[in-house]
Image (cartoon, helix red, strand yellow):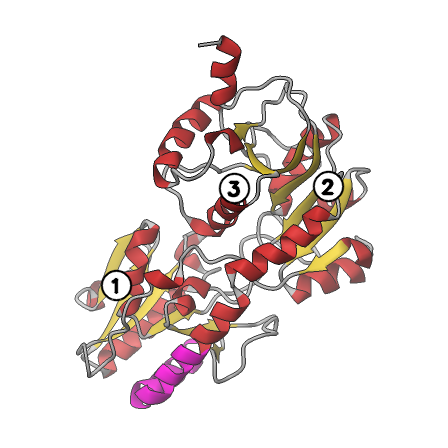
Amino acid sequence: MNIFKLFKANGYNKKIAKEKVIIVDSTFPQLVPFGFRNREIAEYLRSYDFIKSYTMPRLYPDKEAWFSHPYGMTFKQFKTNKEKYLEYYPEIDPGKIQFFHSDACLGADLSYSFFLAETYTLLPLLEKNKIPFVFVLYPGGAFGIDFDKSDIMLQRIFSSEYFRKVIVTQEITKKYLLSKSLCHEDSIEYIYGGFIQFDKNQIMHKKKYQIEKKSFDICFVAAKYSDRGVDKGYDLFIECAKILCRKYNDIYFHIVGNWDKDDIDVSDIEDRVFFYGLRRPDFFPEFYSSMDIFLSPNRPFKLFPGNFDGFPLGADASFHGVALFLSDELKINTEYDSNEIVIVNADVEDIVSKINYYYDNIDQLYRISYSGQYKTHQLFSTELQIEKRIKIFENFIER
């Protein structure tokens, strides 16, 4: 086999013809595909010939960034990940998954990336190759409201001659960029929501309390980023669990993520709380089919200055028909009505009071579950989300 072809097939192409649209991501392809980014990228690669993915090489940010950890992966990691990834997606052309070598001469009409931190770290490589870019400014990823160090990074990106557009998924983000004069309005595209990693045909029959099951089940699904999980409200979840377990003998609590019994003492309710650890996507359809409430009493500004989560957290759970009980201290909910979601304060008394009410009014709870599920299916439609982004891409493709 020609050695050049061998390198190219494995993602190494030091000098390459100009591409149309490249998606540059630090974690794609994954050994075990999961999450909203994988869902989005996979849909592009399956459906559009003019889009390819290029895995971000291991890069460190410059000294202006307020973080110092690298993004991306090594070429060796990429080759291993790609081989395993294609076992899950054999329909994707292997040639559409490439590696962005830092010494490559890569041309493209447009690059597309995710999050502030990742795009900022990638920026010198894009500028070196003179590649115009669009990125999604999701909550998190080093972006903070009224955080000067975050603003410096945003200013650097928006001032690049290769910047074309930023997609924001929350109204609060758009308002912030405009209020601080960080970006011109015509360079901002507001697309609410995002991508769900599941298809409707994966939704399982919902097991109802007192009909198909004897337990009332409340879940907490999140990654741990802070002590006691104060940013995600894990401490509030456990405190509520202890109060509710004293009152009811059929309520159970389920925790998915990198949590365990040592994060907060649960010895007094250890027979009523279950830890599942980190789980693959195929775990969740059956898991959510038995859940009555997804509780997320998250708090903004805890991880770093100005940090906040997007709304709603738990969209995957809502997609599967679980009622969302979410806090919204920043009042950023713009889409869900009170018959589709339950807003809770980030305090134990309010959370327990609302769970008590819906425990006693189970039919109302399930009506909220189904109404919320319908709304989530509308807002997070993969077809709708893809269509809106493709229209943006097409504006920057050379004909």
On the rendered image, what quadrant is the N terminus found in? top left
Asked whether residue 242 appears in the rendered view, the answer is: yes
The residue at the point 60 percent across, 30 percent down is 60
CA gap between label 2 and label 3 equals 17 Å
**Percent position (x, y) of residue 357?**
36, 88
Q: Label 1: few (<14), some or many (≥20) within 10 Å? A: some
> What amino acid is at disc 1?
Val
The residue at the point 64 percent across, 57 percent down is 388
- Left or right, residue 236 beside residue 53: left
In terms of depth relative to the viewer, which is nearer, 66 or 39?
Answer: 39
- Left or right, residue 365 beside residue 301: left
Q: Is residue 364 magenta?
A: yes
Q: Which residue is mark 1?
A: 266
> What amino acid is at disc 3?
Leu
Residue 397: numbered disc = 2
The residue at the point 42 percent across, 67 percent down is 319
On the rendered image, what quadrant is the C terminus found in? top right
Range shown magenta: 347-371
In terms of depth relative to the viewer, which is nearer, 336 or 329?
Answer: 336
**Percent position (x, y) of residue 134?**
69, 45
**Percent position (x, y) of residue 329?**
57, 72
Q: Which residue is mark 3?
A: 45
